[in-house]
Amino acid sequence: MVRKEFVVTEVQKLMNNVENIRNVAIVAHVDHGKTTMTDSLVARAGLISKELAGSQRMMDFDEQEQARGITIKAANISLGFEFQGKDYLINLIDTPGHVDFGGHVTRAMRAVDGIVLVVDSVEGIMPQTETVLRQALKERAKPTVFINKIDRLINELKLDAAGMQQRLLKIMAGINKIIENNCPPDQKEQWMIDVAKGNIAFGSAYNKWAVSVKSMQRFNIGFKDIFDRCSAGDHAFLVEKSPLDEVLLEMMVTHLPNPKFAQKYRIPVLWKGDSNSDVGKSMLECDPNAKTVGICFGVVYDEHAGEVGIVRLFSGKVGKGDMLYIHSKKAYSKVQQVGIYMGPDRVQAEKIIAGNIGACVGLKDIYVGETVSTDIIEPFEQIKHYSAPVVTKSIEAKESKDLAKLIEVVRGIAREDPTLRVELNQETGEHLISGMGELHLEIVEYKIKNEKRVNIITSPPIVVYQEAISGSSPEVEGKSPNRHNRLKVMVEPLSEAVLAAMDEGTIPDGRPKGKELVEKLIEVGFKRDEAKEVWDIYNKNIFVDGTKGVQYLNEIEELVIQGFEEAMAKGPLAKEKVSGVKVTLTDATLHEDNIHRGPAQMLPAIKRSIYAAILIAGDTLKEPRQKILIQTLQDYAGNVINMTNGKRGQLVDMQQEGENATVTTVIPVAEMFGFSNELRGVTQGRAIWYQEYAGYAPVPKELMPKIVRQIRERKGDKPDPPTPQDFLD
């Protein structure tokens, strides 16, 4: 019998028993039933009634989540359970499934040791299913699986028992293929999904029942019983025999690791410090009595408490009054309060202990991915987001008196959501926000207007392009305005291997530190001498010092790096971000008196020479694309293909099953505005579609001049782009 409610004091007690803690994220494609499934666990812990579980969607407590029927942000809850005579604490994170909010999933993976992957039995493995599973495996979070909506196979697809089994085996094989390709090699056998192991369950979250091999044995249910009862609509029998919460809890407790076990293999992947040091050993052991080390994986703004950092602790403990070192700020900050999340509520607690997830109030200007610790240590690897902001809107305050408040609000939202990019223009009062898609920006607008009470005017969506080069340049010489300094540079495209390593995060942005990066650069094709002379990596561009014996060069290094970063932030063609370029400084002639080589001289010298070299190398635009999966009736498949072809779509795959067709295509984001209305038109409303980020690709040559002109005019520049000579005079 489950105790009715574990209050925070009891959760606090359970935090001490690391063997019986599980940190788990519920992940899935949109609408596959994560939040509905989570309700059954919340009900079991006594926080909502069992009758309301499945329809209340407690973890979707945000007003917009309730209105739209989707999860928008990750929600945390700490639940206490009694299972087979032992008390367990499960720190649960319910994550969004919509691609626009995928950043929340990425961040949650850093905090958990295991996941429950929810898959709709009819839709099967969808784009976001694969994405979230790959992200979990990359962060070394062990998977278990719940295949949901089993009743749909019988009632909608009219499958018999054999057909159902075939369908489920196909889904399992697809999941195992992803696990095999992405999991740690030494964990392959343990992590693969297998009915016999019991790390996969099947059921109906809405109807609150599930079965696994263990529950079928324990409750004496066969596959035929499930088929017969679902066909008859007798879900009550299945709930009574094999309730969802019991099966899920058993699967999490048995098959997902406790923090102490998980940190032994997770820490060496997430943290590049010395595992044999005292701090390394204490994290590997999840030692609550050691010095504190944790990572902030979420930031929530509370109007009463200010910024609240949601932290996973890997060692030590945190309580009110403790001083923690914030690594990006290079300063200590005082914890004013700690708490535990109960869905919508943050409840005050005494301490957060190693291996647990909790809230810290008072850590000034903390951001997502921040390392917090008692001492100054090597920070954790950056949390790597797998998609980029592709749609931008201009926003400005309706009334000038609200301008300061708008800037504060936008900065706060950007700290909460690192996938949102914000550019503030203090002079014009116009600000640019870039997000993952139209829905992402809609939610941000709603927050600013309705939650933060700032009236704003927004522009129609704008696409975020990138500038890149199609070839290499010869040596180009740029002069400082006073003509006393000359810098020579060359530019060339970075190889696919280097760009892939940057995407994976193995070559991070920033000034190179240590020998490790040198070895990584050599692995992807850099010569050793060149790899040692990398000065800066910025926005997927690399600056290399290729000079020999230049006097005073060390004195202008900082200015050269600043000029390089400014040039990469706004390219010469359309003032869009530059990506994929290697800039090599080949020679420099510098005035002996440093008064003649200050910022006003050196910044133009380096920027103008880089701009001229980029234009000579062949500056091109790249546009973001979305991979679109469209499910419709076979009769409409031809219309869908014609419509997507008209939007410069590239057909990737088309599959037919019975009356249904699935079309997969890649379409530029610029062609996606109004897509849903057009799709409804050509399918008479009988289509559902999903999208995911598909990277950048060159804009077709015939469209480039027109797009460049449009961007330049929008930014208030002359319509015609500059020539190399404009920067060399």
Image: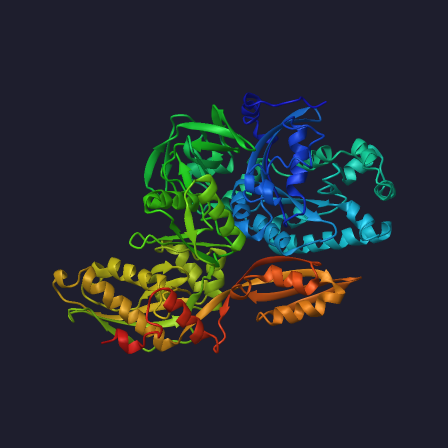
Placement of 488 over or under 16, stated as above or below: below
In the rendered structure, the answer to whether residue 384 lies left or right of residue 252 reads left
**Viewer-proximal residue, 22 or 257?**
22
Q: Quadrant of residue 717?
A: bottom left
Indicate whether 641 appears above or below 200: below
Q: Position of residue 258 (x, y in %)?
A: 59, 35
* Residue at x-position 38% and y-position 41%: 377
Q: Report if residue 631 is visible in the image.
A: yes
Query: Which quarter of the figure is the N terminus placed in?
Result: top right
Q: Provide residue 173's location: percent of width, then percent of height.
A: 72, 54
- Number of numbered labels in the structure image: 0
Colour theme: rainbow
Q: In this view of the protein, can residue 274 be seen by the observer?
A: no
Task: Measuring from the top left, give residue 696's x and y in whole percent.
Answer: 50, 65
Quarter holding residue 611 = bottom left
| Residue 82 place in picture, x, y as percent | 67, 25
Q: Quadrant of the C terminus?
A: bottom left
Is residue 58 or residue 499 the one in the foreground? 58
Whether residue 134 sits left or right of residue 405 in the image: it is: right
Relative to 56, residue 421 above or below: below
